[in-house]
Amino acid sequence: MKWMIPTQHGAWSMLILPFVLGGTVGGWVWTHVPFAIAWLFVYMGTFFLFQYIKQRKKSRELLRTVIIYLMIATLSIIPVLWMQWSLIWFAFAMIPFGLANAYFAKIKDERNVWNDVSAVTSFCIGGMASYYHGAHVVDETSAWVFVLPYLYFLGSIFFVKTMIREKKSIAYRNLSWGYHMLLIVVFIALGYPLLALAYAPSLIRAIWFYGKKIPIMKIGIVEIANSVFVLVCLTMNLLI
């Protein structure tokens, strides 16, 4: 078996931000540790499972890696479900979106925007689960824990499209710029200046980077840094 790590920088932000936001706002408990391990290995296991699905010549080594990762995830989640079995409903909620990702992997169309949206939805459901694990309740705050990162990552999808696959598309440029502007205007109008501030750097980088030849690695690093800023702002907004 070969230990492998996904190299998609943006996906790591999607994995970590909602989970940390949910745990911080809902309250950390000791079982968040095995929960986080399970969450990590579910992501890595499914990532390489999708890689396996799209292979014409199936790699046994890759399949062994997938099995080991998912076994680690399963063993890690046992004490979490023992303490709070109702978390299983969040896993069920992710299944349709995971199947959508598997479908796009099968047809080798992972860059499809709906594949990205499906992945973001799963990650944000994970954030809700992290919140629920500490707070033991599904309430208005849990909805915010889902929606706020979702809005951020949706904008990131549009931004990345304008930088790589759709960099010559005026429609995607207008969608990216317009979406980010709308987020800021709406939250200012609703009286949430901290949320408007959270999404402001996303608008700046969407406009500033457009049309420039920037390495994918640098784009990924910028997204990670932006995610940290967004996490801080969203956490402050939900805790104040």
Image (spheres, helix red, strand yellow):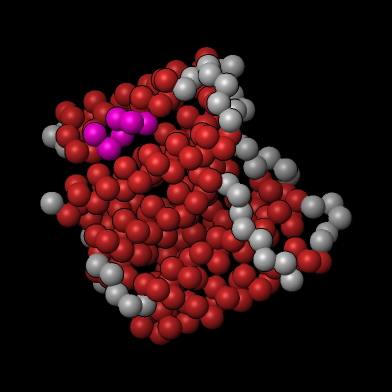
Image position of 199 (left or right of 79): left
Tell me where residue 105 appears, x and y as whole percent.
Answer: 69, 48
Q: Is residue 226 inside the magenta stretch?
A: no
The quadrant holding residue 125 is bottom left
Residue 37 seen from this side:
yes
Image position of 18 (left or right of 190): right
Q: Is residue 156 above or below residue 48?
A: above
Image position of 139 (left or right of 34): left
Q: Residue at x 20, y 49 (%)?
A: 236
Q: Nearer the viewer, residue 27 or 221?
A: 221
- Main secondary structure type of the part rendered in magenta: helix
Q: Residue at x 57, y 37 (%)?
A: 217
Q: Which residue extends farthest right? A: 57
Q: Nearer the viewer, residue 224 or 89?
A: 224
Q: Residue at x 24, y 67 (%)?
A: 27
Q: Nearer the viewer, residue 129 or 194?
A: 194
Residue 175 seen from this side:
no
Q: Which corner quadrant holds the N terminus?
A: bottom right
Tell me where residue 108 appears, x and y as whole percent.
Answer: 72, 43
Tell me where residue 63 appears, x and y as whole percent.
Answer: 75, 66
Q: Residue at x 66, y 73 (%)?
A: 68
Q: Nearer the viewer, residue 164 or 97?
A: 164
Where are the magenta residues, as a range? 197-202
Q: Is residue 186 above or below residue 33?
A: above
